[in-house]
Image (spheres, grey):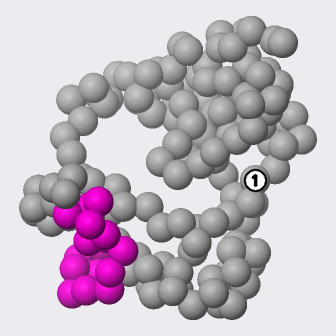
Amino acid sequence: SLPRRFGERLTPELVSRGALDRVGTWWREVNKPQRLVVSRIPLLRDYLNRRVPREPSWRGGNSSAFTEHLYLVGGFDERFSYGFEDAEFGHRLQAAGVHGRSVRYTAPVFHLEHDRPYAGAGVVAANRVLYQASRAERRAHTPFGLPRR
């Protein structure tokens, strides 16, 4: 994550000019700066991407999937709002036999800190219940998302 004060100084122009692509003192301000260092060393980066300590999970901030796999599992479960929706989707992909690959050291994520007025405790708690039920059932498809093709 980029600290809020750093993110507030970023502009679309700075980003398009490659401000986040260059090594700089700003690296000290990010969460997990070692990933930025490793991303610059191809052999080490590729080795570490293959050696993640657990199966890669699907997180919406920096994930992708083939369209056929989205339809296979029904996409995102539309009953979710903020919280657990991406993790639940990822578990359904795994239950359907679709397993991810990590690119944590190839494609670092720069998350800008921001307020989350939509992330109330009640919303997150309700989503946790949906998530736990889906995992307990080892559900591979949701009827509350994309229709089957």
Residue matched to label 1: 100
- What amino acid is found at the position of numbered circle 1 in the picture? Gly
Magenta-highlighted residues:
14-30
Residue 95 position by quadrant: top right
**137 displayed left or right of 120:** right
**104 displayed left or right of 66:** left
Residue 23 position by quadrant: bottom left
Would you say residue 133 is visible in this rendering? no
Screen quadrant of the N terminus = bottom left
Give the x, y percent position of residue 25: 21, 87
Residue at point 53% right, 66% down? 107
Up/down of 57 relative to 83, above or below: below
Up/down of 121 relative to 30, above or below: above
Up/down of 131 relative to 30, above or below: above
Q: Does the magenta stretch include residue 110?
A: no
83 and 122: which is toward the camera: 83
Residue at point 79% right, 33% down? 69
Screen quadrant of the C terminus = top right
- Label 1 neighbour load within 10 Å: few <14, some 14-19, many 20+: some
Would you say residue 76 is visible in this rendering? yes
**91 displayed left or right of 21:** right
